[in-house]
Amino acid sequence: MEQTANILTLTETAIAEVKGIIQAKQIGETFLRVGVVVGGCSGMSYKLTFEKEAMTEDQSFDMEGIRVIVDPKSASFLRGMTLDFSRDLVGGGFKFINPNAKRSCGCGESFSA
């Protein structure tokens, strides 16, 4: 696992939400994996998971106590992205603000680059 400069940024609200989920689920020491997978209405979808271990090829960085990992393939699509969180009743949840996305679907969870 390679310690790198931040590939992406988490807003204060996203950091608070991730920390809240970790505490509520009593996960303990964990990594937040941010990735991209093939699928979704625009070609690629974002993926957020908690993992106990990082893979050797993962790039990692720390954001205010949250250990973030990104696989090398996803890193090129996520570089410069901001992960935000909204508590809006309609359309709330994690928001992916990605300057690499040429097109995005209406829900904001898939994109093409």
Image (cartoon, rainbow, N blue to C red):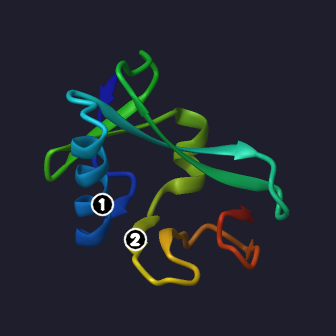
Q: Please report the residue visible at 57 percent of the width from the left and 49 percent of the height from the top.
A: 76
From the viewer's perspective, is residue 54 above or below residue 94? above
Identity of the residue drawn at 43% across and 27% down: 58
Question: Does residue 4 appear in the picture of this structure?
Answer: no
Q: CA distance from mark 1 to mark 2?
A: 7 Å
Answer with the quarter of the image where residue 62 lies: top left
Three-letter residue code for mark 1: Glu
Given residues 22 and 52, the one toward you in this image is: 22
Q: For the residue labelled by badge 2, is the local secondary structure a helix, a strand or a loop?
A: strand
Left or right: residue 39 versus residue 26 is right
In this rendering, is residue 100 above or below 36? Answer: below
Residue 12 in picture, x, y percent from top left? 23, 70
The residue at the far left in this view is 64
Q: Is residue 8 visible?
A: yes
Which residue is identified by label 1? 17
The amino acid marked with disc number 2 is Phe
Query: Percent from the top left, x then y, of residue 64?
Result: 14, 53
Residue 42: numbered disc: none
Q: On screen, 111 above or below 64?
A: below
Q: Classify the position of the C terminus by image quarter.
A: bottom right
Q: Is residue 96 left or right of residue 15?
A: right
Question: Is 18 above or below relative to 99?
Answer: above
Q: Residue 75 at x, y = what percent? A: 52, 45
Q: Nearer the viewer, residue 93 or 68?
A: 93
Q: CB of mark 1 within 8 Å of CB of mark 2?
A: yes
Q: Residue at x 83, y 56 (%)?
A: 43
Side of 107 relative to 31 (left or right): right
Residue at the spot of label 2? 85
